[in-house]
Image: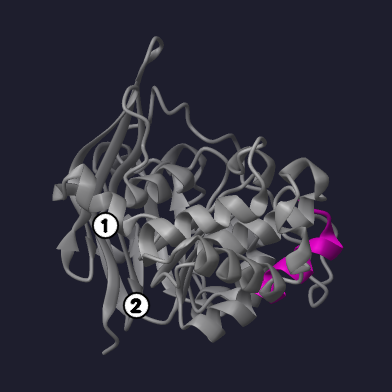
Amino acid sequence: MAERLLDIENLRVEYHTDDGVVTAVENLNLYLEKGQTLGLVGETGAGKTTTALSVMRLVPDPPGRIISGSIRFHGEDLLTKRVDEIKKIRGNKISMIFQDPMTSLNPVLTVGFQIEEAVMLHQGLDHRGAKKRAGEMLELVGIPAGREGDYPHEFSGGMRQRVGIAMALSCNPELLIADEPTTALDVTIQAQVLELMKKLREQFSTSMLLITHDLGVVAEVCDHVAIMYAGTIVEHADVETLFTNPRHPYTRGLFGSIPSLDEDVPRLRPIKGLMPDPTDLPTGCKFHPRCPMAKEICAERVPVDVEIAAGHRVNCMMYEGLVPGYEE
């Protein structure tokens, strides 16, 4: 059995706003094995970014607050560490590529200096050594080292994201969190950035948590995938199993919403309804108002994770034997 690098158990994160308490993440269980890439998939507002920020201990407080649970990295709970301890881990052992490269880079500092700063802080290099390292990292992501004196606004969106990747990998982290790193890019540049991330992950032996809403990206990059809905993981499996044998009604709904070259169907089958209001979540199973398989008990009781096969977990009443299953 592979070593678990990251293990999240029963995580709950809330945001206290003027409109009430928003439960962004609730009873979340997730793990990532060393050397693997895990895709975290879900709609906008599902809680994917909040999960990533929780791992980095960057949930804004106020209004956000980690209420309960544990986040173990190499067996040590990150939520119990002091601020000075977490600063030594953040950007060094765990790095993050943010969704919008323009807002994640400081506009008044050169890209070279921003990479050098992280290297000097965590690797103990002097200015000359850090400058050399910054140039090497830029070259590694396809940017000439001579551009290290340029500012973020002098780069295109794809180039800025490459700078973000160079900065995240500059300290050779064990865990890389990528929060929808290709969302702001056009399709051609998306493919280039994804290919670059795959190559560098193998080169640096880095584990990766890839946050996305694109199942095509998951199929291309990931080893395992976790499907997230309304702050909870509803299905977790390896990529091949999930794509060939999805079991949760929500996962099936996602695949039914995607055009397929292999099936001749007159219409797509979108999931009915909308994501629930996070300030007023449904009782019981959060998906039951939209679920074609839902029964009365689904509104009354929260389902639990059930392992239906080795490494394949589903959070649904059907697999507890409380609701009739699929007829197949």
Which residue, as the protein is rendered here, is positioned at the far top? 18
Q: Is residue 191 magenta?
A: yes
Tell me the residue that label 2 is attached to: 33
Q: Which of these two is toward me, 117 or 202?
A: 117
Residue 120 pos. (x, y %) = 43, 59
- Picture quadrant of residue 283: top left
Q: Amino acid at mark 2?
A: Glu
The reply to whether the C-beta atoms of the residues labelled 1 and 2 are less than 8 Å apart is no
Q: Which mark is residue 164?
A: none
Based on the picture, tell me whether residue 294 belongs to the magenta stretch: no
Residue ID at (59%, 35%): 273
Q: Which residue is mark 1?
A: 322
Kindly report the secondary structure that dominates the magenta region of the rendered protein. Answer: helix
Q: Secondary structure at mark 1?
A: loop
- Read off the magenta span: 185-196
Which is more toward the observer, 176 or 117?
117
Compared to residue 76, the image places residue 49 above or below, namely above
Seen from the viewer's position, the closer of residues 5 and 154 is: 154
In the displayed structure, 208 sits above or below 310; it is above
In this image, 203 relative to 262: left or right? left
Q: Does the image show residue 169?
A: no
Q: Amino acid at mark 1?
A: Leu
Local SS, label 2 = strand
Quadrant the N terminus occupies:
bottom left
The disc, 1 or 2, on the residue closer to the chain's N-terminal end is: 2
Between the residue at mark 1 and the residue at mark 2, the CA separation in whole angstroms equals: 32 Å
Residue 150 screen position, x and y as percent? 76, 50
